[in-house]
């Protein structure tokens, strides 16, 4: 059997509604929903208290004393009940929470249609339905949309309908009308029975009660659809945010932003000038051979963590890890007018972080690590490669030269070696004070490059064993 149009709005496959609770996606989404629920409940309580204060002040001018104090007491209980809901609220089915919502509705129904014990005047019971108090149920319904699922919103609509009509049925069955009033209305309007019925204090005006319920149910269903749609968007956003978080573990913010804002951001092959940096731990093979694998991995994690922070803090892209080293690019996926300067600032941030790290290692009785840096600026080709498992790749002679410059740090006893082209680009982009510390080394033979190159090096002080 096909769902009716209104029911189809709420239809959902069971495997979508109840995903694998052990899956990371479910756990992450549940955490997001819990945070949303807690924030929604806190907001709903504040809104409820504000509404109760406004209604309480309004009743002081509308309801005579001492009758009004009975209703003020009900408002106080409703405010306290909202606080209890916030305390017990959770994602998923909560019978206690549902019980408190039902208590809200029962309390309001009793206060609206039940006799006021403080009243000094005896009203026909039907008049309790004629004061248009039903509209206050909309406050509870609206508050429910701030924190609850669409099912709970529908439950509020259903329970309100049942309580209101149930109270009406009990009133018709058990409460006797005040004698003489109905007859007086008929006598006053002998030729207008509709008018007599409308003005009859004993009349419950059933058609108006049905209209109240019909409108309330329609509004509840509409709000439920809106809440369900919002929750769907929230779940989708949680899934997207999780994917973005996962991407950020492997890609730089530059690439993550490009991947998340474009359908095929890296599909097109591009060619432009970039800065390429290679970083490598000197003598790491010897270091690793005499240590436990767990210590080696922990050292690499600490090293990579320090390097990542510097890279992402200076607009770089972490192209790849190379065991005990890494390749970093500046100007990818899109170039800027500070790529060379950013690369130099990143290098010195890395050096500062490594100096502090080595001081800490020495204090712990561990040997310091030496690290070499090589950087070059020039043209490169950028694109994603692979058929199914894609990788964002930067290729070209610029990459090869940067790698060779890093290897040159051993022969020059330097922490950093950059090409003359890189230095010129830094000067063109505004210069940097750190260039003053570089020493020129002309006519350096670079493997894979036909002509000898002039390079600039930040020399390692004599006897320095640290980075």
Image (spheres, grey):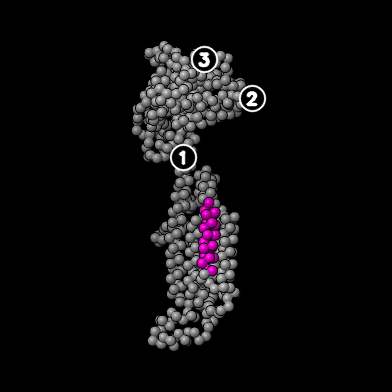
Would you place residue 379 above or below residue 206 in this image? above
Q: Quadrant of residue 9?
A: bottom left
Which residue is at the far top?
Answer: 443
Residue 279 versus residue 28: which sits nearer the camera? Answer: 279
Residue 6: x, y in percent? 41, 61
Residue 167: x, y in percent? 53, 73
Residue receiving disc 1: 244
Q: Is residue 399 visible?
A: no
Labels 3 and 2: the sequence-earlier one? 2
Would you place residue 132 above or below residue 197 in this image? above
Q: Which mark is residue 363?
A: 2
The CA distance from mark 2 to mark 1 is 38 Å
SS class of the residue under badge 2? helix
Numbered range of the magenta stretch: 39-60
Residue receiving disc 3: 413
Labels 2 and 1: the sequence-earlier one? 1
The C terminus sits in image quarter:
top right
Q: Is there a contact, CB below 8 Å, between mark 3 and mark 2?
A: no
């Amino acid at each position: 059997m096909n769902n009716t149009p209104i029911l189809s709005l709420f239809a959902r496959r069971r495997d979508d509604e109840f995903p694998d609770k052990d899956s990371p996606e479910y756990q992450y989404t549940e955490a997001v929903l819990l945070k949303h629920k807690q924030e929604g409940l806190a907001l709903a309580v504040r809104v409820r208290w504000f509404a109760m204060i406004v209604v309480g002040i309004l009743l002081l001018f509308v309801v005579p004393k001492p009758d009004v104090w009975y209703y003020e007491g009900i408002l106080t209980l409703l405010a306290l009940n909202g606080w209890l809901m916030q305390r017990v609220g959770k994602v998923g089915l909560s019978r206690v929470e549902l019980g408190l919502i039902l208590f809200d509705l029962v309390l309001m129904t009793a206060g609206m249609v039940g006799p006021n014990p403080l009243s000094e005047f005896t009203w026909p019971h039907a008049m309790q339905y004629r004061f248009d108090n039903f509209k206050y149920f909309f406050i509870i319904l609206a508050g429910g949309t701030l924190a609850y699922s669409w099912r709970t919103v529908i439950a509020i609509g259903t329970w309100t309908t049942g309580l209101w009509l149930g109270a009406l049925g009990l009133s018709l069955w058990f409460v006797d009308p005040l004698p003489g009033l109905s007859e007086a209305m008929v006598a006053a309007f002998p030729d207008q029975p509709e008018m007599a019925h409308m003005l009859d204090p004993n009349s419950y005006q059933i058609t108006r009660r049905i209209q109240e319920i019909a409108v309330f149910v329609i509004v509840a269903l509409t709000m439920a659809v809106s809440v369900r749609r919002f929750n769907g968007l929230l779940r989708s956003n949680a899934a997207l945010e999780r994917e973005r978080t996962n991407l950020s573990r492997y890609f730089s913010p530059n690439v993550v932003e490009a991947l998340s804002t474009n359908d095929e951001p890296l599909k097109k092959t591009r060619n432009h000038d970039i800065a390429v940096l290679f970083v490598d731990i000197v003598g790491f093979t010897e270091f690793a051979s005499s240590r436990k694998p767990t210590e080696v991995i922990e050292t690499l994690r600490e090293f990579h963590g320090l390097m990542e922070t510097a890279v992402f803090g200076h607009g770089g892209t972490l192209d790849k890890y190379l065991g005990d080293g890494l390749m970093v690019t500046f100007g990818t996926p899109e170039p800027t007018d500070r790529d060379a300067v950013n690369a130099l600032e990143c290098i010195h941030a890395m050096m500062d972080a490594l100096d502090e790290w080595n001081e800490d290692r020495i204090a712990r009785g561990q040997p310091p690590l030496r690290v070499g840096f090589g950087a070059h600026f020039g043209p490169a080709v950028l694109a994603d490669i692979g058929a199914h498992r894609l990788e964002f790749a930067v290729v070209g002679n610029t990459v090869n030269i940067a790698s060779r410059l890093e290897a040159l740090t051993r022969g020059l006893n330097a922490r950093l070696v950059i090409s003359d082209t890189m230095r010129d680009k830094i000067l063109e982009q505004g210069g940097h004070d750190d260039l003053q510390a570089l020493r020129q080394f002309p006519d350096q033979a670079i493997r894979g490059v036909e002509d000898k190159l002039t390079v600039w090096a930040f020399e390692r002080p004599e006897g320095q064993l640290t980075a």
